[in-house]
Image (cartoon, helix red, strand yellow):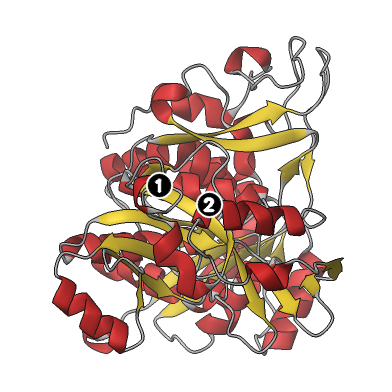
Amino acid sequence: MNHEILFRDLQHKRFRVGIAGARGGFSRTLLAALRAVPQLEIAALCDLDTGGVEQLLAELGYPPAALCEDAAAVRAAAEAGRPVLLRDHTLLDAVPMDIVVEATGQPEIAAGIAERSIRRGVHVAMVTKEADSVVGPHLNELAKRQGVVYTTADGDQPANLIGLVTWARLLGFEVVAAGKSSEYDFICDPADHVVRWTDRRCAAPDLASLWTLGDDVAATLARRSAALAELPQRATPDYCEMNVVANSTGLLPSRDELNYPLCRITELADIFIPRAEGGILDRTGVVDVFNLLRKEDEVSFGGGVFVVVRCTDAGTWEMLRDKGHVVSRNGRYACIFLPYHLMGLETPLSLLSACGHGRASGSDRQAVHAVMVARADRDFRAGEFLEMGGHHHVMTDATALLLPAQEADGLAPFYLAAHKRLRRDVRRGDILREADLELEGSGLQRLRQDIRPGG
């Protein structure tokens, strides 16, 4: 696809962009990208850390924005043609703009910003996956009714994977599995038999004998996992992202816990295939996640995404195997992948598509196909507050699972439960239910109850 041709009709257009959560890492990459895209102009930046945003603007070579504390100041700055800097997210409602990029990471706030924007005719690019996993289909339906676009943002993994899945389907491929690598690689140093994961190290003397899959794939993967048991092998945000992809594509979770095999890129087409053919899947048409195992001098997957497709012509895929493509040992499956995750550097494509062409770059047909839920890791008492925090937005003392929607009736979506108080006791091992939570005043719950996704 030639993107210059695709967007050539917009070269003399100008679209106003608001960014909520402007101090975060995603927004930094987006602001860096916007410097080189003249069609997109910054209208508003919103963050609790306004000083940090001012510093970020200076680092990236932007002129100062007008710090505004009320709607009158916002209107005055807009009339003067100046971008505004806001601490109060409700003031975004007073900013003339064409699209808002929601990147606060706070699900209740994100849903509120998105809903109000849509209702006043502003497109929404949703980066806050925590909100998207709970009410993405509902906000998408509202946007269709209002004649605007609600979309995931290119550059982030959910949008990248939605793009790859729909590309594959359009070309007639059967998508057996689709997924991503988890955030951090497991990097092996064969000289000292140590595996590094971020700043943690784990002795793994048995890993050398497990470097190839062998005949029993599932057994080898289980032994690899056991050899690296000291290191975390599951991450809460992966479940959230796969929830967004499931709702946008109709693919279902591979299993409640997802699989997270520790594997190399060359092994993907032998792993994410039916168990009956030597893989690990009990069903096909699924989303899943893997942990990349590699040596220091081997290329990373870069937080990228993949699809495993069924090979329908042996001769074609043998030719492609000879060209270096990842084809299963039995020749019946192939893995196609995008080994990068460039965050906001790619997001201008989504903004131009929404504002200029009225098209989502993610999915415009969403439904609730899967639900990310929370399993209690200890006994909770009525009245306790379910804390959420950290870089990965984990919920304290709770484990994430991803269920098909038909198995989640009455269960509380993970990020609906976050930052809520319990109205009754919950035992260890139980999955949180909506009835367990005090949900009065929750905008997320109101959207779920008031807007039925059309699918």
> Where does the image place residue 345, in percent across and percent down from the top left?
52, 79
Mark 2 residue element:
helix
- Which percent across, then down, holds residue 179? 45, 58
Question: For the C terminus, which image quadrant?
Answer: top left
Residue type at the position of mark 1? Arg
- Residue at figure coordinates x 65%, y 31% from the top left: 374
Quadrant housing the N terminus: bottom left
Q: Earlier in the sequence, mark 2 or mark 1?
A: 2
Task: Give 417 or 82, whichever is nearer the viewer.
Answer: 417
- Give the label on residue 351, or none: none
Gap in angstroms between the C-alphas marked 2 and 1: 9 Å
Judge by depth and name the residue closer to the eye, 252 or 344.
252
The image position of residue 117, as x and y in percent, is: 46, 48
Image point (71%, 59%), residue name = 47
Tell me, yes or no, whether the two marked residues, 2 and 1, touch with CB atoms within 8 Å. yes
Query: Is residue 239 placed above or below 101 in the rendered structure?
Result: above
Kindly indicate the quadrant of the structure image that contains residue 317. bottom left
Q: Secondary structure at mark 1?
A: helix
The residue that label 2 is drawn on is 218
Camera-side residue of 293 and 34: 293
Q: Crowding at label 2, few (<14), some or many (≥20) Cα neighbours within 10 Å? A: some
In the rendered image, residue 400, in percent from the top left (x then y), is placed at 64, 38
Q: Residue at x 18, y 63 (%)?
A: 170
* Residue occupied by mark 1: 275
For the residue carrying disc 1, how many other residues have a C-alpha within 10 Å: few (<14), some (14-19), or many (20+)? some
Task: Examine the rendering and report whether any part of residue 241 can be seen.
Answer: yes
Image check: 417 left or right of 163?
Answer: right
The mark total stands at 2
Residue 81 appears in the figure: no
Q: Amino acid at mark 2?
A: Ala
Residue farthest toward the top in the current orientation of the protein: 424
